[in-house]
Image (cartoon, helix red, strand yellow):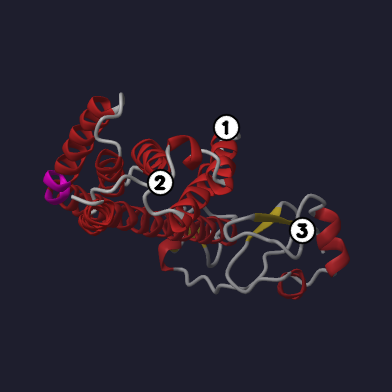
């Protein structure tokens, strides 16, 4: 076999290896670690800028898709930081493809198994998570409904309190206007007693009391009703508005409350 034939055979074997992918990478691990994007990614990992490190290692792969060290770094970042276990498995597989005899090969295989277990756990818990999510949404709806019912109950209680205060005020007014006789006691009317000492009587319950008619004299009070103002009350009791305010120094005429009692000054 002459020299030219040996040379031709060697070139043919080289071409075959290159086509089948068995030809070793042109740059070794040491050269891969000199890539500027790889070096930048390592610096960002050290400074805890994991997002920037991911971008740099991806750029290192764009420059050299067979960079085993870039695949290794991406696999670790996706496993430990982004929790993208599918991406981690892919990059670990690429590393083993390009560095099957690496001292890290067995450890990387264990990482792949762990990533697959995490993926299986995520998939198996999918329906359970959906059920939990539905329960949480239902609970949130019940909580909002309970809050609305509580607000409505408070509004009803406030309305009842106002009604009770109004009724008490009206009763107090009726009692004051029924004097000097007492409610339920007979009022003495008509001519003086006859020779037998009797005279006509009438029950106070039969006396018609007209609301809004002021009773003269001291010690009068007025219970605030809807629509009342100092001006309206002063006209009702025929007193000046200034005198009404003087008799009630602790009452703000602009913020009177239903059921609040005012002192009516003497005429």
Q: Nearer the viewer, residue 107 or 82?
A: 107
Percent position (x, y) of residue 83?
34, 42
Left or right position of 169 against 158: right
Residue 32 % position (x, y): 47, 42
Tell me which corner region of the image, top left, top right, bottom left or bottom right, holds residue 49: top right
Q: Residues within 10 Å of mark 1 (few under 14, many from 20)?
A: few
Kindly identify the residue that appears in the image at 65 percent across and 54 percent down: 261
Q: Are marks 1 and 3 in contact (CB under 8 Å)?
A: no
Earlier sequence position, callout 1 versus callout 3: 1
Q: Which residues are magenta?
A: 123-127
Pointer 2: what residue?
A: 67
The quarter of the picture where the C terminus appears is bottom right
Q: Sequence-wise, which precedes: disc 2 or disc 1?
A: 1
Residue at x 75%, y 68% (from the top left corner): 230
One can see residue 196 in this view: no
Q: Nearer the viewer, mark 2 or mark 3?
A: 2
Give the CA distance from mark 2 to mark 3.
83 Å
Q: Residue at x 30, y 37 (%)?
A: 99
- The answer for how far apart the CA atoms under marks 2 and 1 are is 20 Å
- Residue 233 vs residue 147, the one in the foreground: 147
Which residue is denoted by mark 1 in the rendering?
46
**Relative depth, front residue between 137 and 234:** 137
Residue corresponding to mark 3: 252
- Would you call the spot at circle 3 few (<14 residues within 10 Å), some (14-19), or many (20 or more)? few
Residue 217 drawn at (x, y percent): 74, 58
From mark 1 to mark 3, how far is it between C-alphas? 69 Å
Q: Is residue 208 covered in magenta?
A: no
Q: Secondary structure at mark 2?
A: loop
Quarter assignment of residue 156: bottom left
2 and 1 marks in contact (CB < 8 Å): no
Whichever of labels 2 and 3 marks the residue nearer the N terminus, that label is 2
Label 3: element kind: loop
């Amino acid at each position: 076999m002459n020299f030219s034939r040996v040379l031709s055979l060697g070139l043919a074997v080289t071409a075959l290896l290159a086509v089948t992918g068995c030809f070793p990478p042109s740059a070794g691990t040491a050269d891969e670690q000199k890539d500027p994007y790889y070096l930048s990614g390592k610096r960002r990992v050290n400074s805890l800028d994991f997002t920037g490190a991911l971008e740099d290692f991806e750029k290192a792969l764009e420059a050299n898709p067979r960079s085993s060290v870039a695949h290794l770094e991406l696999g670790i970042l996706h496993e430990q930081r982004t929790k993208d276990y599918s991406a981690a498995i892919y990059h670990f597989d690429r590393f083993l493809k390009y560095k099957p005899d690496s001292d890290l090969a067995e450890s990387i295989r264990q990482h792949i198994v762990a990533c697959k277990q995490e993926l299986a756990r995520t998939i198996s818990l999918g329906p359970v998570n959906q059920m939990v999510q539905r329960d949480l949404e239902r609970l949130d709806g019940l909580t909002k409904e309970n809050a609305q019912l509580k607000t409505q109950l408070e509004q009803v209680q406030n309305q009842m309190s106002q009604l009770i205060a109004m009724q008490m005020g009206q009763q107090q007014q009726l009692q004051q206007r029924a004097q000097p006789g007492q409610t339920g006691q007979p009022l003495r009317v008509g001519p003086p007693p006859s020779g037998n000492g009797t005279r006509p009587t009438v029950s106070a319950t039969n006396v018609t009391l007209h609301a809004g008619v002021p009773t003269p004299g001291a010690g009068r009070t007025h219970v605030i009703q809807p629509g009342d103002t100092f001006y309206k009350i002063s006209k009702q009791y025929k007193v000046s508005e200034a005198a009404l305010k003087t008799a009630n120094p602790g009452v703000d005429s602009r913020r009177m409350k239903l059921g609040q009692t005012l002192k009516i000054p003497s005429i």
